[in-house]
Each structure stands twice: as C-alpha cells, then as structure tokens.
Image (spheres, rainbow, N blue to C red):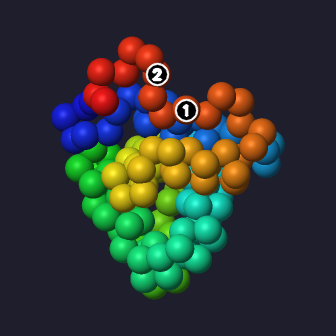
Amino acid sequence: MNQLGVSSNIKQLAERLVAFEAAAQNSSKDDAHATCRVCEKLRRPLTTLTGTAGFTSVLSRALTLAKREAPALRVVQIRPDGSMEGLSSETATAHSVLVAYLLNLLVTFIGEVVTMWLLTDIWPDVPALELSSPRDESK
C-alpha cells in the first residue's frame, strides 16, 4: 500500500479501467472523458444501491482523498447529481488516482467480492479483472 492507503493492485486496476474506456472511444489514454465514463458507469448501479446522495458522497470522499496525492484534481468539482466537472487533459496523470480512491472506498464499504462482481458486470470485456493476487500482503 502507498502512504495514503490504496494498494498497487487497486491503482493498476484503476489505470486499466481508464485505459480501457479511452481505447473504447479511440481516444488518448489520458482522456479526461475516459475517467468520467468510468465514474458514470459506476454511478448507475451505485445510485440504485445508495441513492444519488450516497454516490455523490462516496465520489466526493474519493476526490478529497485523491487531491492529497494528486493536487491537480483541486479544480474538479462533484455536482449534486454525482457527475463531475473540471477534469481536463492537464489533470490527466491524476485521473486514475481518482478512480483508484473510488474503487478503494467501494472495497471498504461493500467488500472486494461485491466490488469485483460489480466491475465484471460493468466491464465484462476487460480481461482478468482482479484486486488481489496470491502475493498481496495487504490482506
């Protein structure tokens, strides 16, 4: 785990999801829209589970945590409906950090098994989605 508590496996998974979304739209890997699509795809089922306020709260917390590691995210705002504004190509290196913190919070609140079920349901074409490995000592 890094100093702020996100394992390298979660960071790698976040990077893969952002890259997958960027590739799906034939855009650059650093596309801010890919990060928005990842969060939007997570927003739909999580809003059903927690309501709009619940999802907005979790995404806002992920953003707050991610800003400590990636200060470029300070311009990003979460709207009351859970959508985001302010992501740009200038903040590209921070995009997967935000997604990593969101995934980390999901694992904390609903567990790894349910989080993985949710991710494989949303992204069935992303090969070998996993959060932990046999050598993952954070467990």
The C terminus - image quarter: top left
The image shows residue 97, relative to residue 132, as above or below, that is: below
In the displayed structure, does residue 33 sit left or right of residue 109?
right
The image shows residue 102, relative to residue 127, as above or below, that is: below
The image shows residue 51, relative to residue 65, as above or below, that is: below
Tally of marks: 2
The residue tagged 2 is 133
**Labelled pair 2, 1 in contact (Cβ < 8 Å):** yes
Residue 73 visible in rendering: no
SS at mark 1 in the image: loop
Measured as percent of width and height from the top left, residue 104 is found at: 38, 48
**What is the distance, in whole Å, between disc 2 and disc 1 at their CAs?**
8 Å
| Disc 2 crowd, CA 10 A, few/some/many (<14, 14-19, 20+) | few
Q: Residue at x 44, y 17 (%)?
A: 134
Q: Amino acid at mark 1?
A: Glu
Q: Amino acid at mark 2?
A: Ser
In the displayed structure, does residue 107 sit left or right of residue 118?
left
Measured as percent of width and height from the top left, residue 37 is found at: 65, 58
In the displayed structure, does residue 10 sit left or right of residue 18?
left
SS at mark 2 in the image: loop
The N terminus - image quarter: top left
Q: Residue at x 27, y 44 (%)?
A: 69
Measured as percent of width and height from the top left, residue 23 is found at: 75, 39
Residue 42 visible in rendering: yes
The residue tagged 1 is 130
